[in-house]
Amino acid sequence: MTATVPLPATAGSLDGRTLPVEDPSTEEVVAHVARGGALEVDRAVASARAATRAMRDAAPLERGRALRRLAAEVESAAEELARLESLDTGKPLSLARGEIAGCVAYLDYYAGAAGTLQGDTIPLGPGSTAWTVPEPVGVSAHVVPWNAPLSMLCRSVAPALAAGNTAVVKPAEQTPLTALRFAGLVEAAGFPAGTYEVVTGLGAEAGAALAAHPGIGSLTFTGSVATGRAVLRAAAEHVTPVVTELGGKSPQIVFADADLDDVARQVVTGFTANSGQYCDAGSRLLVDRAVAGELVERVRARAGALTLGAGADDPDLGPMVSGEHRRRVADYVDLGRAEGADAPTPPQTLPAVGHFVAPTVFTGVTPTMRIAREEIFGPVLAVLDFGTEDEALELADATDYGLGVGIHTADIDRALRVADRVDAGYVMINEYFGGGVAVPFGGTKLSGTGRERGLVALESYLTRKTVVARRRA
Ligand code: NAD
């Protein structure tokens, strides 16, 4: 497998230091990339800064055409990118293919959106008018996570370029390969040199240097709350605007009138897709007591039938992204038992190598347990039951996060009422993971600030200049 995936060329760090890149399915080192730091970030920001004039001066439709060409480049390299992503993250090949198709969708969508940028005109009475002009922020910075590397990158880089900016990207140290490969595709699409710069390296080095850089006009961060706080503090120094997407503990709320077979399928997909390593993973099941036993039985049966294996073999579940992360998730499973929750040992035999965790379903969970409140980012489900709609809402809101919420019921009035009352950024009725590139996504509380996807995301990469004019005669 390893030998069949062409690896991207990597620019060296200025001092020649490198970082190993591991295939989490085999635990083999498959590449080395530059361990960049402050100097490499300086160089990348300067190069991106030099390209801002060309991007800013390009007509919006021209930028849109370039993004469309980039979408076509990604589409023609889709199989190679999917294999690279699967190698780097361990995710099943089909899932990687789906994410690369999602990258094409981001680029296509924002290609079209580039031509829609508009301002307002504000009449101020005889002889006076004001208007607003959307202007790019200049160099946009993107600190990208490891769970869906190229997808997360395209989610923010596509609107940033559509808005007329350049981009400097710091991929996660665990998964830098597709971000590097993407550079060649940006070049092939005909963007000015410097439009897209990548600095690989550690978060505490390259990531921290980028977040604190005075030359960036915006910062988009996806990752943990702790690191989100660190980048917000760093960005505050230069008053850089920041978009943060910091994960969640998203509930799927199931009422007794829901179609339990369909719901069981969605619950299992919700907490096991990408081995639970999605920010909007449905990691809590809140279920009406009347059907809790029956639903848990179906969920455990489905989860127990899932296959685990190397990403390249396209199983249902790949490994955790790293040994460190596997230990973190396994520690949560131990903690759940220590807290008094109940999870039968999953039936799957784990592969001999690779960082695997089998899907684990905890019942007997109370709202104060850490496994009910903290983001685990692995295939671990916490089940809590309720008697009334009010209790369901109380449980849904009983974490510090507010990202996704799934609502399953045949009663549309109830669904709309719960959607209205729940504190979260993204509510899905009868279809978990519903939505897509055109639909704004983001959270409340510790899940972050700002919105990605949709037209609203363009605002994170724009300033609005106001011009007020008086006619003198
Ligand atoms: P992390 O937040 O530390 O890393 C995310 C990105 O931030 C990486 O590119 C990393 O290099 C960079 N980074 C790290 N420290 C930085 C700093 N001081 N300044 C600037 N950038 C920095 O995430 P992690 O430690 O790899 O994972 C820990 C937990 O984070 C996971 O268990 C999960 O709960 C959460 N997480 C969430 C998402 C999400 O999609 N919201 C993605 C990845 C991880």
Image (tube, rainbow, N blue to C red):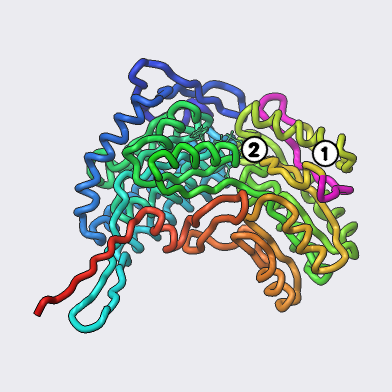
From the viewer's perspective, tell me whether residue 388 is left or right of residue 326.
Answer: right
Ligand 1 within 8 Å, label 1 CB: no
State the predominant SS element of the stretch in magenta.
loop
Q: Residue at x 59, y 40 (%)?
A: 224
Expressed as whole percent of the image width and height from the top left, the position of residue 85 reads 50, 38
Q: In the structure shown, which secondary structural element does the residue marked by tag 1 occupy?
A: helix
**Circle 2 is placed at which residue position?**
318
* Quadrant of residue 114 within the rendered picture: bottom left
Q: Nearer the viewer, residue 165 or 351?
A: 165
Q: Which numbered marker is on residue 336?
A: 1
* Residue 288 located left or right of residue 329: right
Callout 2 secondary element: loop
Q: Earlier in the sequence, mark 1 or mark 2?
A: 2
Q: Is residue 362 magenta?
A: yes
Mark-to-mark CA distance, 1 and 2: 22 Å
**Quick check: 112 above or below 329?**
below
Residue 428 in percent (x, y) is at 64, 64
Question: Could you tell me which residue is drawn at 53 percent across and 52 percent down?
Answer: 449
Quadrant containing ligand 1: top right
Query: Nearer the observer, disc 1 or disc 2?
Result: 1
Q: Specify the amino acid type for callout 2.
A: Gly
What residue is at 71 percent from the left and 69 percent from the top?
418
Marks 1 and 2 in Cβ contact (< 8 Å) = no
Picture coordinates of residue 279, whole percent (x, y) = 61, 47
What residue range appears in magenta?
350-368
Q: Amino acid at mark 1?
A: Gly
The quadrant in which residue 323 appears is top right
User: How many numbered discs sit on the rendered protein?
Assistant: 2
Query: For residue 240, which quarter of the picture?
Result: top left
